[in-house]
Amino acid sequence: MKAIIFGSGGQDGFYMKRLLRRENVEVIGVSRSADIVGDVADRSFVEQMIAAERPEYIFHFAACSTTGHEAVFENHDAIATGTINILEAAYRHCPESKVFLSGSAMQFENNGTPIDEQTPFAPLSPYAVSRIASVYAGRYYRSLSMKIYVGYLFNHDSPRRSPRHVNKLIADAAREGKQIEIGDISVKKEFNFAGDIMEAVWLLVNQNVVFEAVIGSGQAHKIEEWLELCFGLAGKDWREYVSETPNFTSEYRTLISDPALITALGWRPKVDIGGLARIMMER
C-alpha cells in the first residue's frame, strides 16, 4: 500500500508520515523543502508524480503558513490550484485512490458557538476563499464517483510548529525566558495535539460513507491559560515576560468545534491542553 503526502515538510505531513509508517504504508513525501522537492501548484509535476506512483492514498497538506492577505497568491497556488492539480491527476490516473483535502476552522461563519459540518462557509479572508474553493472542487470530483475526503482541522500544535504561531512562540519564550509581545490573551480556542488530529484524518479516510468531518476536541481555552501552563512548567511567572500588543483586534473571540461526527466514528483526542504544554515545552 502506498501514499503520497503533498506538504510532507510541514507539521501535519510529519505526523501523517509517522502514522502511515506504523500502518506499514509506503510513504512518498513531497514538499518545497524536504523529501521529494516539488510544487503542488505545478500541474505537470503533480500529474507525473501521481501517474508514476498510482497511490492508494493522497494527502494534501500543502499551504503557506501565513494566513494573512499578504499570502493571497501563495495560498491560492498551494491550496486551490494544488487541489485541482491533485484531483484531476488522480481522476485521470488512479480514480480509485482516496484523496484527503485539508480544510480549516477559519473557513466557517463563527458566532462563538461550536462549528459543525452544517455551519455555512464564510469567505472572510483570502485563506478562507482558497479553502472553500478546495472543498467545492473536492465535492465536484466526488460527484464523479471519486473518494474525496475533507477534514476541517481546528487549532492543533506540536514542536514542529513555526515560531510565528502564537502557541509555539509562547512555549519557546517560557522555556528560554524570552520577552514576547502577543495579542489578546482572552481569546478562546482549541489546543489539540497534531498527532491526535492526524489519527482522526486516518480514521476519516478509511470510511466509505462519511467524507467530510470537523476535527477538533470541542474544548476551548483562553490563551491566558496556555501562558500559565507553559510558564508554570518552566517555573516562571508569565506576567514578567509577556506584554500585549496595543490596539490588537483578534479575528475571533472564540473558535470551537462540534466534533460529534468524528467522535461517533470512534476518535477521541488523547492529549489535553496540559499534555500539549508538556510536549511543546520538551525539545
Image (cartoon, grey):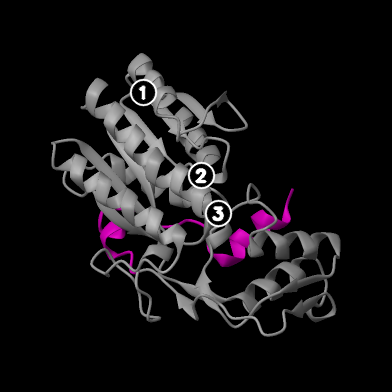
Q: Which residue is mark 2?
A: 12
Which mark sits nearer the N-terminus, 3 or 1?
1
Tell me residue 5's x, y (percent): 45, 32
Tell me residue 26's x, y (percent): 43, 21
Question: What is the spatial separation of the Cα atoms under label 3 and label 1, in whole angstroms?
Answer: 25 Å
Q: Mark 1 packing: few (<14 Cα in 10 Å), some, or many (20+)?
A: many
Q: Which residue is mark 1?
A: 47
Query: Which of these two is toward me, 122 or 222?
Result: 122
**Extreme residue in the top direction:** 52
Q: Which residues are magenta?
A: 258-283
Quarter of the picture holding the N terminus: top left
Determine contact: label 3, label 1, CB under 8 Å.
Answer: no
Please, what is the three-letter code of the amino acid marked with disc 1?
Glu
Q: Nearer the viewer, mark 3 or mark 1?
A: 3
Question: What is the spatial separation of the Cα atoms under label 2 and label 3, in whole angstroms?
Answer: 20 Å
Which mark sits nearer the N-terminus, 2 or 3?
2
Question: Is 229 displayed left or right of 132 in the figure?
Answer: right
Residue 114 inside the magenta-drawn segment: no
Q: Secondary structure at mark 3?
A: helix
Q: Is residue 161 above or below residue 110?
A: above
Tell me residue 47's x, y (percent): 36, 23
For the point 53% across and 63% down, the residue is 272
Query: Can residue 8 be seen by looking at this rendering?
Result: yes
Q: Secondary structure at mark 2?
A: helix
Question: What is the spatial separation of the Cα atoms under label 1 and label 2, in whole angstroms?
Answer: 22 Å
Q: Which residue is mark 3?
A: 71
Which mark sits nearer the N-terminus, 1 or 2?
2
Please, what is the three-letter code of the amino acid marked with disc 2?
Asp
